[in-house]
Image: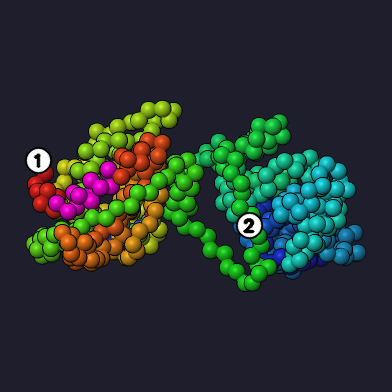
C-alpha cells in the first residue's frame, strides 16, 4: 500500500498560522474530509480536512507549531481504493464563524440571524480586509448562526492572551465570543467550556457583556490588522509586563486619580548628602536622594494616616495601617517591579539607603521573592536618576497615593527681594480622590516638600 504526505492546503495570504489542535494520532483511520488539524488565524479557527482515506503513519506537526500553505502535516498509508484516485488538495474548512471577523461584523451591521446574512458578513470580511484571503461564501455553521450580534467583538490581543485550552478557544471562535471578557474559574484561572457558555448565556439573556473586562462597560479599542499598513513584528509581552499592564489598567479605571504637583528645596539636603556619602560608601551604602525622600514620606505618612490606608472591599471603610511599608518602583530588565521596604519608619537614613539598594539589586537580578513585593502601604516612583520635570504616576492600588519624583535642578528662586539659585526637586503626588480630598492632597505634598528642606530631621537617629 502506498503512502502519501498530506500538506496544508492553500491558505491564501496567511502564513505561519498557529496549529491549536491536532485531531488525529498515529494509527488512526481517516476518511476523506476527516478533520486533521485546527488552525487559528487572527480572525478565525478552521479545520484542515484530510484529502485522503487511509491510516495515519506519521504526524509531522504538533500543537503549537506554525504552518503555511504546503507545510507537510502527516503521512497517510492510503486505503487501496483511495490510492487509485488521488484527490485534489482540500480547501480548509470555512472559518467557523462570520462573527469571528469582528471588524467585518461591525462593518456589516445587518449580518445577523440567517445563513444568507452570515454569508454576507463573510463576504464583507473579505472586502474589508484586502490583505486576507476571501472567506468562502458558504453558509455559516449552526453555531455561527446562533452567534448574536450583541456579543462584543473579539479583541485579538486579549483573546490570544486568554488562559484557555485549544478546544475552548475553538468554541469561542465558533461562538464569536471574546475570551478576554470571560472570567476563568478553573484551576489557575483557566477558562473552561462552562465558563465560556455561562458568559455567552449571560450576554444573550441580557446580563450585559459580562466578564471582568466588560463589567465597567468600557468601549473597546479596535485593533486593526497593522500589516496592511506595512511590515510588522509581533513581540510577546514579558510576564512582568503583562502583570503590570493588568494592574495599571485596574487602578486607572477603578480609582479616580488626581495629581498634585509641588517642589522641594533640597539645596541643603544635597550638601548634607555629599558630606555623608563618602562615609556611607565606606560601609558599602550608596546614599542617594531617594533615601531622603523615603524618610520624608515616612514623616508625612505618620502625620497624615489616611495616606497610609486602603479602602476595604465594600468601599465604605478605610483600613488604616499601623505599619509603614514603602514600595518603590524599580526599573529592571524584566520590567517594572515594586520592592517593599518593610517598617520603613524603623530605619534610619543609612538603613533606608541600604534597603533601597539591596532590594533594587535583587529586583534587577531576578532574585526578589514574591513576599518582598507584598504589603506595601504607600509607593514612591522616582525617575529622578533619569530626568523629567513632572509626571502623573498611577496609584499602586489598593494603596491610595503614590509620590512621583522627577529630576532635581538648579533654578532661580525669588526670595527676600532677589533671585537665589536653589536645587529644586519636583514632586507629583497622585491620590485616590474617593479617599483623599484636594486640600489634604495639597497638604501632604507640601509637608513632604517641607520635610525634605529640613534635612537634619531626616538624618536623625530613629527612636
Ligand atoms: N534628582 C536628581 N538626582 C537624583 C534624583 C533626583 N530626583 N534621584 C536620584 N538622583 C541621583 C542619585 O542621588 C544618584 O546620584 P549620585 O550618583 O551622585 O549618588 C544618581 O541620581 C543615581 O541614582 P540611582 O538611580 O542609581 O538610585 P536611586 O536610589 O535614586 O533610585 C531606583 C533607585 C531603583 C528607584 C532607580 O534606579 C530606578 O529604577 N528608577 C526608575 C523607577 C521607575 O521606573 N519609575 C517609573 C515607574 S512608573 O510610575
Q: Quadrant of residue 345?
A: top left
Q: Which residue is mark 1?
A: 463
Q: Is residue 345 above or below residue 135?
A: above
Q: Quadrant of residue 315?
A: top left
Given residues 293 and 151, the one toward you in this image is: 293
Residue at 21% x, 61% y: name it. 414
Residue 300 in percent (x, y) is at: 23, 43
Residue 252 in percent (x, y) is at: 46, 46
- Circle 1: element type: loop
Q: Which residue is mark 2?
A: 223
Q: Is residue 28 visible?
A: no
Given residues 87 and 192, the one toward you in this image is: 192
Check residue 445 for magenta coloring. yes
Given residues 140 and 226, the one toward you in this image is: 226
Magenta stretch bounds: 443-454
Quadrant of the image for the N terminus?
Answer: bottom right
Left/right of residue 241 with respect to residue 211 in the rendered view: left
Q: How is the image coloured?
A: rainbow
Amino acid at each position: 500500500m502506498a503512502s502519501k504526505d498530506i500538506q496544508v492546503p492553500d491558505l491564501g495570504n496567511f502564513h505561519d498560522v498557529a496549529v491549536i489542535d491536532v485531531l488525529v494520532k498515529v494509527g488512526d483511520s481517516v476518511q476523506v474530509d476527516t478533520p486533521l488539524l485546527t488552525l487559528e488565524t487572527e480572525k478565525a479557527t478552521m479545520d484542515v480536512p484530510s484529502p485522503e482515506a487511509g491510516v495515519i503513519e506519521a504526524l509531522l506537526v504538533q500543537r503549537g507549531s506554525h504552518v503555511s500553505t504546503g507545510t507537510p502535516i502527516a503521512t497517510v498509508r492510503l486505503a487501496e481504493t483511495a490510492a487509485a484516485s488521488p484527490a485534489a488538495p482540500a480547501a480548509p474548512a470555512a472559518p467557523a464563524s462570520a462573527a469571528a471577523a469582528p471588524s467585518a461584523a461591525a462593518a456589516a451591521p445587518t449580518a445577523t440571524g440567517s445563513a444568507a446574512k452570515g454569508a454576507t458578513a463573510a463576504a464583507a470580511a473579505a472586502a474589508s480586509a484586502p490583505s486576507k484571503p476571501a472567506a468562502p461564501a458558504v453558509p455559516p455553521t449552526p453555531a455561527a448562526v446562533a452567534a448574536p450580534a450583541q456579543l462584543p467583538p473579539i479583541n485579538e490581543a486579549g483573546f490570544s492572551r486568554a488562559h484557555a485550552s485549544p478546544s475552548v478557544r475553538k468554541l469561542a471562535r465558533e461562538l464569536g465570543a471574546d475570551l478576554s471578557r470571560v472570567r476563568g474559574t478553573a484551576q489557575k484561572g483557566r477558562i473552561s467550556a462552562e465558563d465560556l457558555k455561562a458568559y455567552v448565556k449571560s450576554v444573550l439573556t441580557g446580563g450585559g457583556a459580562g466578564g471582568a473586562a466588560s463589567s465597567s462597560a468600557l468601549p473597546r479599542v479596535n485593533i486593526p490588522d497593522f500589516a496592511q499598513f506595512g511590515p510588522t513584528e509581533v513581540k510577546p509581552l514579558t510576564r512582568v509586563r503583562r502583570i503590570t499592564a493588568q494592574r495599571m489598567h485596574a487602578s486607572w479605571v477603578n480609582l479616580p486619580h488626581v495629581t498634585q504637583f509641588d517642589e522641594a528645596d533640597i539645596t541643603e539636603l544635597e550638601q548634607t548628602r555629599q558630606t555623608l556619602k563618602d562615609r556611607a560608601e565606606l560601609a558599602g551604602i550608596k546614599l542617594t536622594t531617594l533615601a531622603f525622600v523615603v524618610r520624608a514620606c515616612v514623616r508625612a505618612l505618620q502625620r497624615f494616616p489616611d495616606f497610609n490606608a486602603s479602602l476595604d472591599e465594600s468601599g465604605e471603610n478605610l483600613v488604616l495601617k499601623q505599619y509603614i511599608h514603602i514600595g518603590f518602583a524599580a526599573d529592571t530588565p524584566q520590567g517594572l517591579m515594586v520592592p517593599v521596604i518593610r517598617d520603613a519608619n524603623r530605619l534610619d537614613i543609612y538603613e533606608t539607603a541600604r534597603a533601597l539598594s539591596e532590594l533594587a539589586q535583587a529586583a534587577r537580578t531576578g532574585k526578589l521573592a514574591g513576599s518582598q513585593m507584598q504589603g506595601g502601604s504607600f509607593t514612591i516612583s522616582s525617575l529622578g536618576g533619569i530626568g523629567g520635570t513632572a509626571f502623573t504616576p498611577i496609584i499602586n492600588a489598593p494603596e491610595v497615593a503614590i509620590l512621583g519624583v522627577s529630576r532635581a535642578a538648579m533654578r532661580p528662586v525669588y526670595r527676600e527681594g532677589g533671585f537665589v539659585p536653589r536645587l529644586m526637586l519636583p514632586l507629583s503626588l497622585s491620590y485616590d480622590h474617593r479617599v483623599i480630598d484636594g486640600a489634604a492632597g495639597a497638604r501632604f505634598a507640601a509637608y513632604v516638600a517641607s520635610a525634605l528642606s529640613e534635612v537634619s530631621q531626616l538624618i536623625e537617629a530613629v527612636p
